[in-house]
């Protein structure tokens, strides 16, 4: 029996769940995407179809393969129905411990006996999330990167009880969806979020202090360090609401160097989350950044 015979359930049809469901459906897995918000499911389905159709137009994929991927993908508002007999759960709902645990508990009542429960949390404790089910050895972090269809890395995160067998199976799942996995012991922010949260926060402090404009801070990191994106444009892509939640957790667990910059708190209060709300550090129209729209900083 190949891994592709296993049924996959992705819970949370937001930015990340959309990309994750696409990755599994395009790689041959029967995949069900679940969200409590019907509009999120509609948006996700359209976005996945667009990625597949664009792949055909660019000659990266056969039209028949794209249609097959679409037919392997199901949309389902009801988690209980979606989880029945499934082998792999990928929880990628909002970054909130109580919500994530509730999703795990509800799914566990229905999933296959040997199922693996993974979470795409950016910074919460896998060990703590694992207390929601009675098989903590089969709970693991599966941390993807945005946009999922372009980013190769997955951080697999071992909680206190995660078994070697679970890690080995998850490495095989990553290979099956053409991702490169690394294994990280649970620690706040893992390797990447910890580094990225620090850089994004520091860039916001610089913006708040008027050290340089948003465009110039991003240009500095792109051209000075060869980063493909600057920390402020990356924050707009990730969403400052998610960023703030991560920073608050790192501040609490790792100390003062992660204290969220007040400008981030203000932006989140104003609903300026980034690309997903059309306005963050930059403004966006029809999904495109408006030239010259970057924040100037208070002293500039
Ligand atoms: N945004 C990123 O770049 C990024 C990267 C890696 C990991 N993550 C993590 O992935 C997770 C999701 O992030 P996102 O950016 O996709 O968030 P998002 O806000 O875009 O999407 C979250 C989705 O979860 C749904 N949801 C909330 N509660 C639910 C429930 N009980 N049942 C079903 N659906 C529910 C919401 O309706 C929403 O559609 C978070 O844990 C985040 O930390 C985010």
Image (cartoon, grey):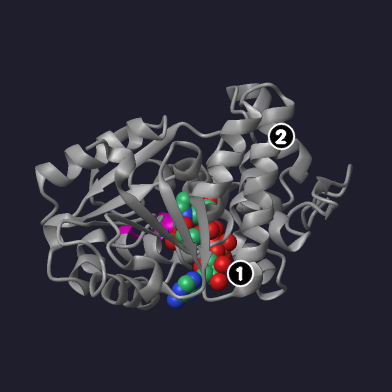
The image quarter containing residue 88 is bottom left
Q: For the N terminus, which image quadrant?
A: top left
- Mark 1 crowd level (few <14, some 14–19, many ≥20, 10 Å Cα): few
The image quarter containing residue 224 is top right
Question: On the rendered structure, is 243 left or right of 51?
Answer: left
Q: Residue at x 12, y 64 (%)?
A: 135
Along the line of sight, the residue nearer the viewer: 151 or 238: 151
The image's mark for residue 193 is: none
N-terminal-most mark, 2 or 1? 2
Measured as percent of width and height from the top left, residue 167 is found at 19, 42
Along the line of sight, the residue nearer the viewer: 197 or 255: 197
The secondary structure making up most of the magenta span is: helix
Q: Residue at x 40, y 32 (%)?
A: 179
Query: What SS does tag 2 mark?
Result: helix
Residue 161 belongs to magenta span: no
The residues colored magenta run 254-259
Q: Is residue 261 visible?
A: no
Tag 2 near tag 1, CB within 8 Å: no
The image quarter containing residue 96 is bottom left
Residue 258 belongs to magenta span: yes
- Residue of label 2: 54
Q: Is residue 147 visible?
A: yes
Query: What SS does tag 1 mark?
Result: helix
The image's mark for residue 265 is: 1
Question: On the rendered structure, is 14 left or right of 78?
Answer: right
Alpha carbons under labels 2 and 1: distance apart:
37 Å
Measured as percent of width and height from the top left, residue 36 is found at 52, 76
78 over 207 or under it: above or below: below
Q: Nearer the viewer, mark 2 or mark 1?
A: 2
């Amino acid at each position: 029996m190949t891994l592709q015979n296993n049924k996959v359930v992705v819970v949370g049809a937001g930015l990340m769940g959309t990309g994750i469901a696409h990755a599994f459906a395009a790689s041959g897995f029967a995949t069900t995407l679940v969200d409590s918000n019907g509009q999120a499911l509609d948006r996700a389905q359209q976005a996945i179809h667009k990625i597949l159709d664009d792949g055909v137009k660019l000659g990266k994929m056969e039209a028949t393969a794209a249609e097959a991927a679409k037919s392997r993908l199901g949309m389902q508002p009801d988690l209980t129905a979606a989880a029945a007999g499934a082998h792999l759960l990928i929880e990628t709902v909002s970054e909130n411990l109580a919500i994530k645990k509730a999703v795990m508990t509800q799914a566990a009542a229905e999933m296959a006996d040997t199922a693996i429960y993974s979470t795409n949390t950016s910074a919460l404790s896998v060990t703590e999330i694992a207390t929601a089910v009675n098989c903590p050895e089969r709970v693991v972090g599966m941390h993807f990167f945005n946009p999922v269809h372009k980013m190769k890395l997955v951080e697999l995160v071992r909680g206190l009880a995660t078994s070697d067998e679970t890690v080995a199976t998850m490495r095989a799942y990553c290979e099956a969806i053409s991702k490169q996995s690394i294994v990280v012991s649970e620690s706040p922010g893992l390797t990447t979020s910890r580094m990225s949260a620090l850089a994004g926060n520091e860039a916001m402090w610089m913006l708040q202090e008027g050290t340089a404009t948003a465009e110039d801070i991003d240009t500095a990191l792109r051209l000075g360090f060869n980063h493909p994106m600057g920390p402020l444009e990356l924050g707009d892509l990730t969403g400052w609401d998610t960023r703030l939640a991560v920073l608050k957790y790192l501040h609490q667990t790792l100390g003062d160097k992660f204290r969220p910059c007040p400008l981030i708190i203000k932006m989140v209060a104003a609903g300026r989350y980034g690309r997903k709300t059309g306005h963050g550090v930059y403004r966006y129209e029809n999904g495109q950044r408006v030239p010259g729209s970057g924040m100037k900083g208070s002293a500039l």
